[in-house]
Image (cartoon, rainbow, N blue to C red):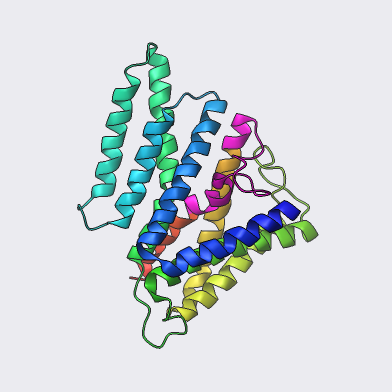
């Protein structure tokens, strides 16, 4: 617990400073986080018995983040980058003596790169989000900072609500073969907490708070799915944490797993209904 408190005391202020600076600083921070998360993800895949090409996969993941930071460089560049990445990894896998190993390496490397590359949607959300109207309570933040803050607080609220309610009232558990501590009560508590926070932030951003009735649960459930996805990967690798980078908190992937799923879902909702 002491290590967790120290880690949080260091991480949270740094994260808030990066968010306050925004722009290229935020994109660079996401790229750095992606490098560490990719390193851990490829190690987990290897430990799970799936050979990979970590360096090539990490470069592909960071390139996806860089593309998100400069969306106007080339129309449809995200899909193009994925296509080129799949081709390059396939060519690299040709060198392996066993075609079966080559196929597994190709598939696992592409999966790892695109899985970790989902973190790029944090940056894409900042670019895609609608402007904050003048006079809105949070107009000082601007669109990028305001909407990414909504995502951060919604995911944190889910984690906090799920922990508090689950530890007090959690009896019935679900998906124990992946994560033994998840309870239905915690799930409900987390969804409620996330929905309330999203409603408040939407109001602050000059949006209709009723959108929180859909956006809140979507972020909450996708965050939970992201956590479970990483837990499945760790179970397959027979390890508790993705790494030891952050004292008391495990690795970088342990810290961003929820955002890997929550960020694209939030971005899709914002593009579909709020722009």
Q: Compared to 93, does 84 lie above or below?
A: below
Q: Which residues are magenta?
A: 233-261
* Residue lying at 56% horizontally and 61% vertically, measured from the top left: 155
Q: Residue furthest top?
A: 97
Give the left or right position of residue 63, taking residue 208 as reference.
Answer: left
* Residue lying at 64% horizontally and 61% vertically, measured from the top left: 9
Q: Closest to the observer: 18 or 233?
A: 18
Q: Is residue 223 visible?
A: yes
Q: Closest to the observer: 172 or 230?
A: 230
Q: Residue furthest left?
A: 74
Q: Compared to 93, does 269 lie above or below?
A: below
Picture coordinates of residue 159 (x, y %)?
63, 59
Give the left or right position of residue 106, taking residue 213 as reference.
Answer: left
Q: Compared to 164, does 51 lie above or below?
A: above
Q: Closest to the observer: 137 or 30?
A: 30
Q: Is residue 271 visible?
A: no
Picture coordinates of residue 94 (x, y %)?
32, 18
Q: Closest to the observer: 141 or 98?
A: 141
Give the left or right position of residue 249, taking residue 126 as reference.
Answer: right
Picture quadrant where residue 23 is located? bottom left
* Residue lying at 49% horizontally and 43% vertically, measured from the top left: 36
* Residue lying at 65% horizontally and 55% vertically, measured from the top left: 7
Q: Is residue 27 magenta?
A: no
Picture quadrant where residue 101 is located? top left
Q: Is residue 238 magenta?
A: yes
Picture coordinates of residue 257 (x, y %)?
54, 48
Q: Residue furthest bottom?
A: 135
Picture quadrant where residue 111 is located? top left
Picture coordinates of residue 73 (x, y %)?
21, 54
């Amino acid at each position: 617990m002491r290590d967790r408190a120290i880690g949080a005391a260091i991480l949270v202020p740094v994260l808030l400073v990066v968010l306050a600076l925004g722009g290229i600083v935020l994109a660079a921070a996401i790229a750095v986080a992606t490098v560490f998360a990719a390193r851990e993800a490829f190690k987990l895949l290897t430990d799970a018995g799936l050979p990979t090409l970590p360096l090539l996969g990490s470069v592909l993941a960071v390139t996806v983040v860089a593309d998100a930071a400069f969306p106007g460089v080339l129309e449809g560049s995200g899909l193009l980058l994925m296509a080129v990445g799949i081709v390059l990894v396939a060519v690299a896998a040709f060198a392996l003596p066993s075609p079966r190993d080559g196929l597994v390496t190709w598939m696992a490397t592409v999966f790892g790169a695109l899985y970790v590359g989902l973190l790029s949607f944090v940056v894409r959300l900042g670019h895609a989000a609608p402007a904050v109207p003048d006079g809105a309570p949070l107009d000082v933040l601007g669109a990028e900072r305001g909407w990414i803050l909504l995502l951060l607080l919604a995911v944190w609220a889910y984690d906090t609500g799920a922990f508090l309610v689950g530890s007090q009232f959690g009896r019935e558990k679900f998906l124990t073969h992946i994560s033994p501590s998840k309870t239905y009560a915690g799930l409900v508590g987390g969804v409620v907490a996330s929905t309330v926070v999203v409603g408040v932030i939407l109001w602050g951003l000059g949006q209709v708070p009723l959108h929180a009735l859909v956006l809140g649960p979507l972020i909450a459930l996708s965050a939970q799915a992201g956590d479970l996805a990483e837990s499945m990967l760790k179970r397959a690798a027979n390890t508790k944490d993705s790494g030891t980078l952050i004292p008391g908190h495990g690795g970088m992937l342990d810290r961003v797993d929820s955002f890997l799923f929550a960020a694209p879902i939030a971005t899709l909702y914002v593009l579909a209904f709020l722009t």
